[in-house]
Image (cartoon, rainbow, N blue to C red):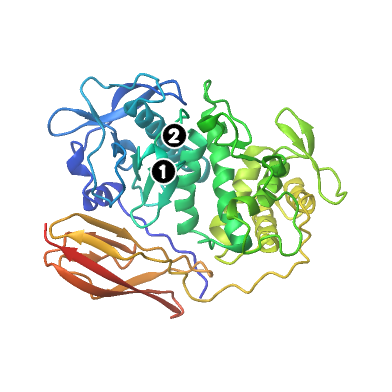
Amino acid sequence: MNRTWKAIVSATAVVAALGIAGEARAGTTPRPGFGHGYHSGDVRIGASRNANGEFVLVDTARGGLQVRNLGNGYHQGWDQGRPSSDADNVWGNGDKADRQTADVDAYFAAARTWDYFLEQHGRRGVHDDGTGPRVFTDVGQPDDGFFAQYDPECGCMLLGPAVGGNAAWNTTDVVAHEMTHGITGMTAGLDLHGEAGGLNESTSDVFGTLVEFSVDNGKDRPDYTIGEGVTGTPLRFMDDPTRDGESKGCWTPGVAGDDVPNHHVAGISNKFFYQLAVGSGKSRWGDSPTCGGAPAVTGVGNDAAGKIWYRALTRYLVPNSNFSGARAATLRAAADLYGANSTEAETVAAAWLAVGVDGSDPVPAAPQAPSLKWVNTQRGAVGGEVVLRLRAPDPQHQRVTFAAKGLPPGLTLNAATGVVTGSPTQQGTFEVTFTAADCDGNLSDRQITWEVVPR
């Protein structure tokens, strides 16, 4: 059996099930507010009102998407803190050191990322079920260094504070990059090592860039660099990734060795995407040479390139895909969308050749069983709210169902979505086994320890 399955769940029901409705008046629409961001500038935002009458950064129009400022504390779980609040619905002062300003930028970027995926690809949030993520800002101390992360277990983004006079980690492309990691984990499930790890990071750079272009903000102009708004110097360059002195730009055998970080491996597919969208050579966006004397490439534009990448991600890429596998996946996606002999399909082949990927490198055999991702040891308190998301993309893109043995009393697992919710009612240490199964009976398991302490 080789069926694509998608759970269709009422966004209202999911939001209520995850306890979001209690933080903003259920059934309300966001109230128009005004934010002064550092990265985004002066922007309109939609806030909600809580039971105390305060405005809170909870977007009920986007599945309860919300921002919680941890004030330099460390993230310890889904239910930590409360949504950022304000009395008059005018947020921030535009100063990069102001906490509320950081919240404005993060909230605005997350909302625009939601909008991009909905409008361009019909996707209703990270999990495609209508629920919005929680965004935790000012996570950790400034001397911890630069920090931005997607936590797949809670469906949260964790964004660090301003460091050493720089801005906080909440530019549009950085927030969209992290949110895309969640989408990748729910679809292709790309591994975090080797060429698959490079493709994982590159996917986030690609959609971080496309979201930035879709926003077209006057203060943070769109470009093909990543994270330039944080320090003033780009973290990565898509036209010629080697400009950062560490990233790869042309594929060679063994390019993704054990000592090569995923972000550096990602340069190969970043450059592929740039040439697919923009083309090779010099342009207003940069200078992108081809590899090994490959012919010049004429780009097909962001819209077509983004649609091809998204379809490849959600239909054809698998956890252990390498660059040759990505070439095959994007060629199939282009053929689906535009035809096998279309200009778009021909440009996909040319853009991969321009980074040294001609399809001759063997594509690893895809695994058969669902790829049940790693789950960390869990720790919580009696009565504390729990939301734990399991992820198990299936290489055959079949329906996956979940089961659990040994959950602490008070917690339940939704077999269709893989979300554990509830509040523990009994303290103790519990050995839990999670199982994911596809329609053919292929199984994968994870065992964890779950500790519940007194409230």
Percent across and percent down for residue 218 are 53, 20
92 vs 114, nearest the viewer: 92
- Kindly indicate whether the residue at mark 2 contacts the one at mark 1 (C-beta within 8 angstroms): yes
Percent across and percent down for residue 239 are 71, 39
Would you name the residue on which mark 1 appears?
144
299 vs 174, nearest the viewer: 174
Question: Is residue 299 placed above or below 88 in the rendered structure?
Answer: below
Q: Identify the residue at image location x=16%, y=70%.
A: 428
Q: Report whether 307 appears left or right of 17.
A: right
Q: Identify which amino acid the numbered label 1 is placed on.
A: Asp
Question: Is residue 180 placed above or below 169 in the rendered structure?
Answer: below
Residue 285 at least partly seen: yes
Q: Identify the residue at image location x=23%, y=75%.
A: 406
Percent across and percent down for residue 362 are 72, 70
Q: Identify the residue at image location x=35%, y=57%.
A: 153
Would you name the residue on which mark 2 appears?
163
Among the 4 quarters of the image, the one containing residue 226: top right
Among the 4 quarters of the image, the one containing residue 86: top left
Q: Identify which amino acid the numbered label 2 is placed on.
A: Val
